[in-house]
Amino acid sequence: MASTPTSASLWTRGFTLLCVAEFLGYAQHFTLQPALPLYITSLGGSPFIVGIAIAANGVTSVLSRPIIGYWVDRWRATGMMVLGMIGQGLAIFFCFLPFNAAVICANALRGVGWSGMAASGYTLLASSAPPERRGEASGYFGGVQSSATIIFPAISLFLLEASFGGYYAVFSFAIILVFSGAATAWTLVRATPAPTRSSSVDPAEPWWREIVNVVDRHILAAASLIFTLNMSLPCLSSFVVLYARELGISHFGWYYVAVGITSALGRPLLGRLSDKFGAGRSLIIAFACESVALLLMPWQSNLVGLVLCGALWYTGAAIGGARIMALAIAQAPAERRGRAMASYSTALPLSNGLGALISGTIVDAAGYHAMYTVAAILCSLGFIVIWKQWAKLK
């Protein structure tokens, strides 16, 4: 088959359906993002318990990723995406039980479903993106995911304050979104032919060894970079709503609208530019934006200041996320792409969970100002990772 020309449209039917399904799955996640910390504290939980709940999602997502990657390769990515979204929707029902333990359990179960959705989505992206336009395709893919931030956290906060709403209304809305994503992914199953099994797979090799060996050394550079880039994400997504409440800031839904627009527009535009700038220079800019934003956060006392810092952080995340995803796609071996991309995507929930646990612990011990300062120090470690991986980034 001839290679895809550079001028050919990326928006094929399969890529469009993939982006719609991912959008709905992320919409569910961003609907719960500001609601769960507030729900946990309303039930008597502390910021540390919030960190535990977020970390529970990351732990189960990481632990389930090997077997998810195995079945993506052995079965089909679209089928695993459908199951992952259905699992997330069923898990949210536990949030209707007014106990923090139930919320933690729900988030842990959501982590398994998220693992199926994430590993499948990255695998389908890797197989559909033309090699010469991977940065652009990754930018669009990430932009579609992050565009859910524009409106859904604000809808969540609106439902919480509305006379007809409340936490249960938010949970019901999130369930509808993710089940709609599952229906879209099912359409993608019919539009995508079943993959042929790679001839490089040794049928005599025990199935458990394939699962244990999910970590692919080719993907470690990209995984270490995305881990460092996203460790401070909970500070700007989940804990920021608690920080705003402490500062007495109202109408905070506009924060999520502003950073969502920044991320949604930035990922496709900056993803295309990152193809021209190269990985090394793009990542230096990305980590610089995030580090400066985190250092400035403790000095803000109003909505405008928080929005500007959040927009700067998400700009860095947009630049780095698109470039690192393109790097992962390029490094993933075609014969075990499902497991390689599962290994890469493990870094995301792992960094989110560890970052949330560290953030919640620091807030309980020293407050939000210390949390943002420590997060900036951890983010700056990304420059060391870039230096160590410079040969591969070139």
Image (cartoon, helix red, strand yellow):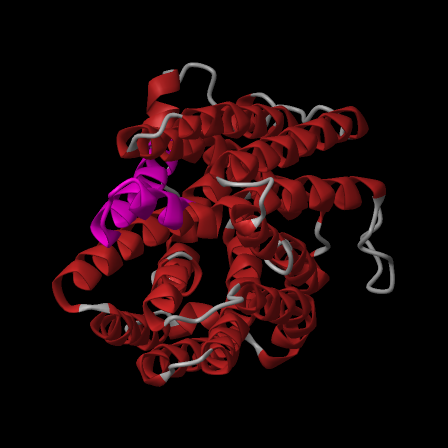
**Can the viewer see residue 392 in this picture?**
yes
Task: Locate the N terminus and report the quarter of the image it occupies.
Answer: top right
> Is the residue 214 above or below the residue 148 in the image?
above
- Choose top left, top right, bottom left or bottom right for residue 299: bottom left
Q: Residue at x 63, y 47 (%)?
A: 126
Q: Position of residue 37 (x, y in %)?
A: 37, 49
- Magenta segment's dominant SS is helix
Q: Is residue 260 magenta?
A: no
Q: Position of residue 237 (x, y in %)?
A: 44, 60
Q: As drawn, is 38 to the left or to the right of 275? A: left
> Is the residue 103 above or below the residue 325 in the image?
above
Q: As drawn, is 12 to the left or to the right of 301? A: right
Q: As drawn, is 380 to the left or to the right of 265? A: left
**Can the viewer see residue 337 in this picture?**
no
Q: 273 and 46: which one is in front?
A: 46
- Choose top left, top right, bottom left or bottom right for residue 259: bottom right
Q: Residue at x 18, y 62 (%)?
A: 362
- Residues rendered magenta in the picture: 36-65
Q: 91 and 145: which one is in front?
A: 91
Q: Tell which residue pokes out farthest to the left in this image.
A: 365
Q: Position of residue 280 (x, y in %)?
A: 47, 77
> Is the residue 247 above or below the residue 178 in the image?
below
Q: Residue at x 84, y 59 (%)?
A: 5
Q: Is residue 49 magenta?
A: yes
Q: Position of residue 181 (x, y in %)?
A: 67, 34
Number of numbered discs on residues: 0
Q: Residue at x 54, y 28 (%)?
A: 89
Q: As drawn, is 44 to the left or to the right of 42? A: left
